[in-house]
């Protein structure tokens, strides 16, 4: 045997051991064979084999040895081994050899075996394999190989088994899976083992040994591409940030690690990394100038994370843009980003067709980019930013969505303040909310530190309003500092012992009395120039109209005309609410003449858009009040006043109309329950059904005829959207009226031409109207009157539900599809309907 070459000698010895394990019945021979195989793994001074034999065994025979053990796992001699022999000889062969070969054989055995004690034995060995740091040994063994010695197929298989170990074990073990194999436990363990391998690499480089990070980089990319970047990088990123803080070798290792990640996986690594690092400084230390060397990394950092995706928090934007701004070589990319983001923000098509969340995200990126620019850089980009600001503000202010207009105002203010154009700054009036405060805070740069990562402080959180649990009304907030000031003054002036009399409960004596008759009220509104009299008349107008029905019918149209044209010349408190409440009361009390006047004036010349919107709002509120059942006890001013009290002016908020549809949908939804159910609601008479046509059909008369000051199908899409909402509400309220089917057909014909309108408010109105038609029209009318349009309508609704950028449009489309399918199913199952069609 001594004269044989090492490879031949090892092959002969291993073959003899395999025959002994397969055929021998003597336990001593089996133990001797296992000891012989085990001796080829021992590297101590007492080892009985030479280094050449050990290397040959690891290279060519170790995998076959483990496969032989797994194939004989059910043999009798395995069960006759003592616990110590099984641990040292059987298990030791798996835990002391080349880790990549052991892992592949273990995963192959676990996949092949059926549930049994033998499977449990392999699972326990796999647990020990992970607990003893063998994954770190596996990664480190590949770091020592400057050139890969295995085939690409074998390396890909090893990566797949190592990264997908939780999935493989879960599929096989199911409920009996081990805790260590769960993703929440395994991937942090793998990250820790990778850090150990990287630490050994750094030490080896300091000692002058060359290393390769190709396999470690492939492992990192494989973990991230399979969706486990959050738990993996939550362990890896903070440690890399800490190690690279003062160690240049660690920085070189991290840069090389990211450079070796395959192109197809670099995106998932970078997106996970920007969410896991503490700040832009840590990002720069970990990835270095990767964006300058890797085109895919540049695309992800400068384009995809900023313009194509909008699901990330503001912290991610700060990290990405701060990373680009932190280095002189990367700042040209920041200027490139500013140009592309400003163009996207100012694009009119993007304002119309992208979701509000994405527009907010782009606005944040724009403000952060501008805030990171130096004065000299802004001077070079001044003309481009000015064009962006003016064009973008125009596009945002033309939108019907309040939030989009508010974003345009805030961004315009911030850009003008940063560019300081001739010392002038834009200033708008808008309601402050969390979104606007966050946008304003982005212009103030934040100082971050890596030691030990403090919580970021936002500007809008520095000075919160001081509130206590005992201070209730807003008046008390102002009286508190006044009282403290009074106390100080009283201390200074000791001679003044008289305390002021409390006048807070006093009321000013009115010199004018409110009118008691409706005609007096009308004359005051027409001719009076005294603010007090006009205000008192407005405040009692609604109650006088509701109390004096016969007098109202004599002057209803005249009073409606006066209220429609009256102006708030005296800045009366709640002027719009009082005016609207009186007009609604007139429309309810004398419905047909007032409605005919309002619908005729809607298309008349020389009316402002505000007045046309007021007409629609009055008609909608009047229809809602008239639709209440006659038997219901109605409280005076229950219609417009009650609704107007809930909002400052409901004309700016058409969303509450859709609540009626939501309630209707809930009422038509079938639910499985035990016990008796409530009987279906019966149709009850109301005052709206006889006059529904007077509300609805006149508004469809001249919509396609552009006037001098009014173009409904052109630029005045705000009024178009509100008109469609109102018509849909009219159809919904006429659910049991005989004219409901005719109204539904007319409304579908009207909205079909504008179903692909560019403005999202118009599309919402169209879908609201379609939903109202499906709720109000009887099932048989849907099949008889709209049979030619139903298939095309259903296809259109499906397209909207999948692809519309507005979330409300998608939701309304889904509701309409559900209602349409339910109505058709109900009608097709009705034998009477089938006989009618036949």
Image: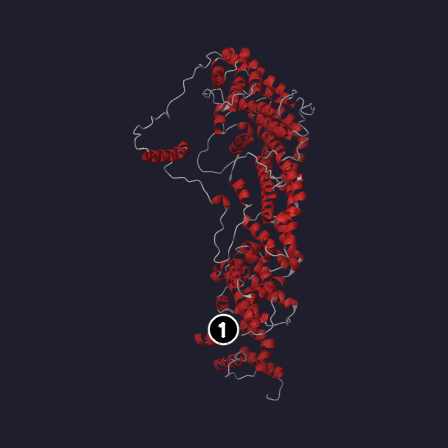
Number of residues whose C-alpha sits closer than 10 Å to that of mark 1, classed few (under 14), some (14–19) or many (20 or more): many
Residue 80 appears in the figure: yes
Q: Is residue 453 left or right of residue 790?
A: left
Residue 708 location in percent, x, y?
A: 69, 23
What is the quadrant of residue 8 in the picture? Answer: bottom right
Asked whether 349 or 668 is in front, the reply is: 349
Residue 9 location in percent, x, y?
A: 60, 84
Task: Say above or below: 413 vs 135.
Answer: above
Task: Say above or below: 60 vs 526.
Answer: below
Residue most extreme to the bottom: 3
Q: In which quarter of the image is the N terminus?
A: bottom right
Asked whether 586 or 648 is in front, the reply is: 648
Residue 602 location in percent, x, y?
A: 62, 21
Residue 609 location in percent, x, y?
A: 62, 25
Q: What element carries label 1?
A: helix
Q: Quadrant of the C terminus?
A: top right
Q: Is residue 679 left or right of residue 101?
A: left
Task: Say above or below: 22 vs 294.
Answer: below
């Amino acid at each position: 045997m001594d004269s044989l070459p090492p490879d031949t000698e090892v092959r002969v010895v291993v073959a003899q051991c395999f025959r002994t394990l397969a055929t021998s019945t003597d336990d001593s021979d089996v133990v001797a064979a296992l000891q012989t195989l085990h001796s080829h793994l021992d590297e101590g001074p007492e080892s009985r084999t030479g280094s050449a034999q050990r290397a040959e065994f690891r290279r060519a025979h170790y995998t076959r040895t483990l496969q032989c053990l797994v194939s004989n796992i059910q043999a009798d001699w395995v069960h006759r081994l003592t616990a110590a022999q099984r641990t040292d000889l059987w298990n030791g062969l798996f835990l002391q050899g080349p880790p990549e070969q052991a892992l592949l054989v273990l995963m192959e055995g676990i996949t092949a075996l059926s549930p049994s004690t033998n499977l449990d034995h392999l699972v326990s060995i796999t647990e020990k394999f992970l607990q003893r740091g063998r994954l770190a040994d596996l990664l480190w063994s590949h770091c020592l190989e400057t050139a890969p010695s295995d085939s690409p197929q074998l390396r890909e298989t090893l990566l797949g088994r190592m990264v997908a170990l939780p999935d493989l074990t879960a599929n096989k073990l199911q409920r009996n899976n081990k805790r260590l194999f769960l993703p929440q436990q395994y991937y942090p363990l793998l990250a820790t083992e990778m850090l150990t391998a990287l630490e050994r690499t750094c030490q080896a480089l300091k000692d002058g040994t060359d290393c390769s990070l190709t396999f470690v980089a492939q492992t990192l990319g494989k973990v991230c591409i399979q969706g486990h970047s959050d738990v993996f990088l939550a362990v890896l990123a903070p440690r890399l940030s800490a190690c690279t803080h003062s160690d240049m070798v660690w920085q070189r290792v991290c840069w090389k690690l990211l450079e070796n990640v395959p192109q197809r996986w670099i995106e998932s690594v970078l997106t996970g990394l920007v969410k896991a690092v503490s700040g832009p400084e840590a990002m720069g230390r970990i990835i270095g100038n990767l964006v300058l060397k890797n085109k895919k990394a540049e695309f992800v950092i400068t384009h995809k994370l900023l313009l194509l995706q909008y699901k990330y928090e503001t912290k991610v934007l700060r990290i990405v843009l701060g990373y680009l701004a932190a280095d002189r070589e990367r700042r040209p990319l920041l200027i490139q980003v500013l140009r592309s983001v400003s163009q996207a923000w100012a694009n009119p098509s993007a304002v119309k067709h992208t979701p509000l969340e994405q527009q907010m995200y782009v606005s944040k990126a724009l403000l952060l980019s501008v805030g990171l620019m130096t004065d000299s850089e802004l001077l070079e980009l001044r003309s481009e930013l000015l064009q962006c600001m003016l064009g973008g503000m125009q596009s945002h202010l033309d939108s019907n969505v309040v939030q989009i207009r508010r974003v345009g105002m805030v961004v315009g203010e911030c850009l003008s303040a940063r560019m300081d154009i001739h010392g002038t700054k834009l200033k708008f009036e808008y309601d402050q909310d969390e979104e606007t405060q966050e946008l304003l805070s982005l212009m103030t740069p934040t100082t971050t530190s890596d030691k030990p990562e403090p919580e970021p402080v936002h500007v809008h959180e520095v000075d919160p309003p001081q509130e206590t649990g005992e201070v209730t009304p807003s008046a008390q907030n102002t009286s508190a500092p006044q009282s403290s000031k009074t106390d100080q003054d009283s201390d200074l002036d000791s001679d003044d012992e008289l305390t002021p009399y409390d006048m807070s409960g006093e009321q000013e004596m009115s010199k004018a009395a409110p009118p008691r008759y409706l005609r007096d009220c009308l004359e005051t509104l027409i001719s009076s120039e005294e603010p007090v009299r006009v205000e008192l008349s407005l405040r009692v107008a609604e109650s006088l109209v509701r109390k004096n029905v016969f007098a109202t019918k004599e002057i209803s149209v005249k009073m409606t005309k006066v209220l429609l044209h009256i102006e708030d010349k005296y800045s009366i408190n709640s002027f719009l609410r009082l005016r609207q409440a009186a007009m609604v009361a007139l429309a309810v009390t004398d419905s047909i003449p007032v409605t005919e006047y309002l619908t005729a004036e809607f298309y008349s010349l020389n009316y402002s858009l505000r007045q046309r919107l007021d007409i629609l709002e009055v008609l909608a509120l009047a229809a809602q009040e008239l639709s209440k059942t006659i038997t219901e006890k109605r409280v005076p001013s229950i219609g417009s006043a009650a609704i107007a009290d809930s909002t400052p002016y409901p004309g700016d908020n058409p969303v509450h109309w859709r609540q009626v549809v939501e309630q209707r949908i809930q009422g038509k939804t079938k639910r499985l329950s035990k016990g008796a159910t409530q009987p279906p609601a019966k149709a009850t008479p109301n005052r709206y059904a006889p006059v529904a046509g007077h509300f609805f059909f006149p508004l469809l008369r001249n919509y396609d005829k552009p006037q001098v000051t009014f173009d409904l199908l052109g630029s005045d899409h705000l009024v178009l959207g509100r008109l469609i909402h109102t018509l849909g509400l009219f159809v919904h309220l006429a659910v049991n009226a005989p004219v409901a089917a005719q109204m539904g057909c007319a409304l579908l014909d009207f909205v079909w031409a504008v179903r692909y309108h560019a403005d999202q408010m118009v599309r919402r109105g169209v879908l609201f109207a379609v939903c109202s038609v499906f709720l109000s029209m009887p099932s048989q009318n849907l099949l008889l009157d709209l049979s030619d349009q139903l298939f095309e309508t259903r296809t259109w609704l499906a397209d909207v539900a999948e692809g519309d950028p507005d979330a409300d449009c998608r939701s309304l489309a889904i509701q309409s599809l559900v209602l349409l399918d339910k109505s058709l199913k109900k009608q097709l199952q009705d034998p009477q309907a089938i006989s009618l069609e036949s």
